[in-house]
Amino acid sequence: MSFNWRFNHLGMMVADRDEILHYYQSIGLGLSVGPQPLLPYEEGEGEITFFRELDGDPVSHKYITGGPHNFRDGQSQIGNCQIEVYPMKPGPGMFISRYVESKGGGINHIAFNTADIENDTNYFKDLGCDLVFNVSVNGKTTENYIDTRKHGDLMISLRPSADEWENSWRRNNESHPLVSNWNFIGQGICVNDLNAASDYYSSLGFEKISEEKDDQEWSVSRQQFSLGEVSFELIQENEKSIYRNSLSQRGEGVSEIIFEVEDLESELLKFEKKGISALVVSGNKKKGLDRY
């Protein structure tokens, strides 16, 4: 299937939103740009459906919209990528709270805008993917989470096409002088079984960009897929590597966010001045660094 989607954000669920936003800004990584803009007011009936547990039957709640939707998230602008930082109290009540309780904070979904949210949602439902979260107003879906966690523990979130209201807010964020000119490429996802994960992503309609390859320098095997022009790099550890702590503490899931920068050495130096050291630096010494 051809996914003509536009990347919206990476969703990070945490126990303390303000702590994360402050840390990212203090090290010069991401600029805190506040919550998402309020949606225009619309009279009518809204409905929210969500799993209470990490796995289980959804529970439906209906409410009457009494004004514009109010977001409780914070947003960190990193280049042209927005990180949605959403605070959730660990424990019972909702599957996201159970996620934070089970794995701690981290990225658990990637959101896209689509021109046909109902059709694209049904595509995944027909493949056996559950809707773990769905919000609608007057029968029109405004946001959902699709359960694609089987390998890589990452959900897909869909939203309708962004309107000028949202697009102008994004342009304003990206033009801020403290926002870097980094270009978001995608994310690296740790998996326990690369072959099984590859088959799963292929079955969902992701485009395979590369065959599996061993990266001896990093002690891992990698394979790259894409969806909506975003890279999904599957990573399986072969020997002890920089991904060991992520796998042992959180299991499968997003372990890195990938950006393209104009001057990698300069960006590394900026972080070193903030006390942030590179875990691994690789590349051809004659041609310069290519990743870290």
Image (cartoon, rainbow, N blue to C red):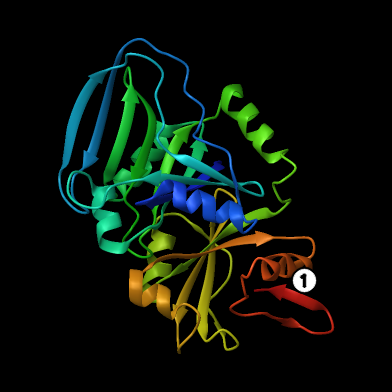
Residue 171 to residue 69: above or below: below
- Residue in view at x 65 percent, y 27 percent: 168
Residue 45 lies, in percent from the top left, at 28, 15
Residue 278 lies, in percent from the top left, at 62, 75
Please name whichever residue, 209 or 270, is drawn nearer the observer in this view of the structure: 270
Name the residue beneath numbered marker 1.
Answer: 265
Please name whichever residue, 185 or 266, is drawn nearer the observer in this view of the structure: 266
User: Horizontal placement of 166 versus 84: left or right?
Assistant: right
Residue 91 to residue 34: above or below: below
**The C terminus appears in which quarter of the rendering?**
bottom right
Q: Residues within 10 Å of mark 1 (few under 14, many from 20)?
A: some
Callout count: 1
Please name whichever residue, 263 or 221, is drawn nearer the observer in this view of the structure: 263
Secondary structure of the residue carrying tag 1 is: helix
Whether residue 282 is visible, yes or no, is yes
Please name whichever residue, 73 or 170, is drawn nearer the observer in this view of the structure: 73
Residue 213 to residue 182: above or below: below
Residue 108 lies, in percent from the top left, at 39, 54
- Residue in view at x 50 percent, y 80 percent: 242
- Residue in view at x 56 percent, y 84 percent: 218
Whether residue 251 is visible, yes or no, is no
Amino acid under label 1? Glu
Furthest residue toward top: 43
User: Horizontal placement of 229 versus 240: left or right?
Assistant: right
Quadrant for residue 200, please give it.
bottom left
